[in-house]
Amino acid sequence: MENPVRYEAHGDIGVIRVDNPPVNATSHAVREGLVACAREFAASPQKVAVIVGEGRTFIAGADITEFGKAPREPHLPDAINVIEALDKPVVCVIHGTALGGGFEVALGSHYRVMLRGARIGLPEVNLGLLPGAGGTQRLPRLIGIVPAAEIFTSAKMISAEDCLALGIADDLSNDDPFEAGMAMARKVLAEGLPVRRVSEMSVPPTDEAALEALKKKVARANRGHVCHLKAIEVAVEGTKLPFTEGMKLERAAFWEMMQTPQRAAMIHAFFAERKVASLPEIKGVEPRDLSKIGIIGGGTMGGGIAVSCLLSGLSVTLIERDAESVEKAHNGIARTLADSVKRGKLGAEARDMLLSERLLVTDGYDKLSDADLVIEAVFESMEVKKDVFTKLDAVCKPGAVLASNTSYLDVDEIAAMTKRPEDVIGLHFFSPAHVMKLLEVVVAAKTAKDVVATGFALTKKLKKVPVRAGVCDGFIGNRILKTYRTAADIMVLEGASPFQVDKALEEFGFAMGPYAVADLAGIDIGYLTRKRLAPTRKPGERFGEWGDVLYELGRLGRKTGRGHYIYDDETPKGRPDPEVEEIIAKERRAKGITPRDFTDAEIVERYMAAMINEGAKVVGEGIAQRPLDVDVTKLYGYGFPRFRGGPMHYADEIGLAKVLATIEEAGKAGDDIWEPAPLLKELVAGDKTFASLN
């Protein structure tokens, strides 16, 4: 194999080319090559060197194929030290992205030129880590502790223009990478610019108040995570020391983070997101055309789907029922796009073009005659959806994909309304659809393989995370949700407070507990779901009825100012309502329940056991193909804390035998939700893990 790093002489300028497709990752061979080329430059007559990446990007980060393997020398910090220690200046050219170790290589160079459009970042916290090759030591010495910490705790990518303003970049260029590097090298030669090592710089003065404010902000935004605040601590303490000692501190903290369960969980989440779209059933299958999208329904969901499609370069025809609804839907989409302009995500001219050239909102189904894929996003009623699909079957062209955005309903039953069930699929978006990344691709019994491939092609086009789901009530995400929400309700009936449940789960890592979520979504949503499922409820099945009482009292959550919590000017995010406790106490008395105390740990244990057990049933029945599909669904659609990796990964971490014991103990009360999943019992008996099925 040809060395991915090579040295070239161009008169007085040496060029170190990194050529390790597709993203020039810092593999062992790249690290070896950087050291070898740095030494070749040191021994050469060339007076200045340029480090440049081939292809579409500079070094975009670590080599993920080396994750989990024993590290091999030279380690990246050592390779960077060799570059920085050179007695002749080195210019680094950043195009595309310089992330993680790639940016740290740039920091070890003496001068940095960035192409316009290039970005840098230190995303290690997304993997439960902190920068380990000088990011917490060189960057604060270059630009100050607070701005540096804002970069490595946010994992955000910083533009070339912002890098110039911060002092990270020395110059910006519109040339190609090689010419930009050569121009900067010639400037270094002409002006006699010296070797300038970041490691030898003094840290700019720190605004202590700003630093404390940043720590509080980071702690709030990353509750439960350990790596973010650890990175700040290492930057602050390390920069008080000589650079070599600061680097030792950083490396020790990096390896400490490597051993944490959070790192293992976040690495699992990282790889699961990449594996989830890999389906043997569509390997080599060509998707159908996907340029013209039809959408039925212009409410919150339909409008969000339309915006997502428009921003991804697709043309959209949206159907509403009458002229008034057409205007309302168009105005809603326009407002959302205007918000994108306000936040700098979209230009005003681009917004105007999308609204005038790419979007048609109408009440005529005949306008869908040339649509490649139509997504129904109407009210969650089987009768309404059947009526829509009957109309679509009549007007859509042969080969058009007909998709339902249903959250719960039977896609096979919907498909049966058409003469082309092989063209029907479920595409379950999550609200707000233009923001949420998860998309459940629901494959019905007769769905054609190229239609499945088209569903996955659409998710890629929309930059979403797809999960394949089979047909059952609620598919993967909502089916599991119903079970663990029922488990929470049973604990409340038995004596826990809904506010204690929320608090315990928020401390576990969820952004919100189930009752705060119910208030946010609307108490009416749960009420309507319970009414829909009432005919299938088994005799003796326990469930919480206080939600129905809240609905009947008009307390629908945030939108009415009262639900489980009170929402007003005093507490816009909500405060516990004692009247809810009284309503629940009345229900307990009516059902003859003597309340008992629950610890926070017991609440989390039971809630998670219910989630894991239903997840095991979903995998065992083939509704989800692998445990990782459950993890990704919960991580991207339901706010499961990423630093715990997903419910199935978490189950492996705490031990499946322990989970089964919790289920069996809770099941003594006779509730069906605690029937142990056959797959879980099988794995425990065989001393295996969910990971073994991935």
Image (cartoon, helix red, strand yellow):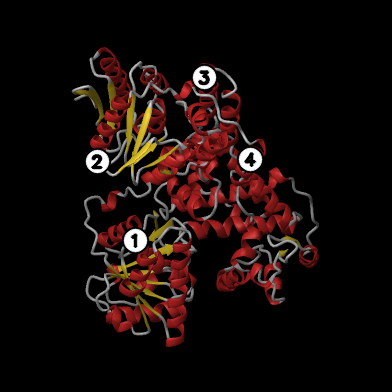
- The residues bearing labels 1 and 4 have C-alpha atoms spaced at a distance of 38 Å
Of residues 197 and 281, which is closer to you in this image? 197
Image quadrant of residue 524?
Answer: bottom right
Residue type at mark 1? Ser
Residue type at mark 4: give it: Ala
- Look at label 2 and name its amino acid: Asp
The residue pinned by badge 1 equals: 312
Mark 2 or mark 3, earlier in chain: 2
At 68% from the left edge and 64% from the top edge, which residue is drawn? 544
Number of residues whose C-alpha sits closer than 10 Å to that of mark 3, classed few (under 14), some (14–19) or many (20 or more): some
Q: Which residue is mark 4?
A: 210
Q: Which residue is mark 2?
A: 176
From the viewer's perspective, tell me whether residue 11 is left or right of residue 121.
Answer: left
Disc 4 residue crowd, few under 14, some 14–19, many 20+, Cα 10 Å: few
Residue 592 vs residue 93, the one in the foreground = 93
Residue at coordinates 75% horizontally, 48% vertically from top-left? 598
Position above or below: 86 against 173: above
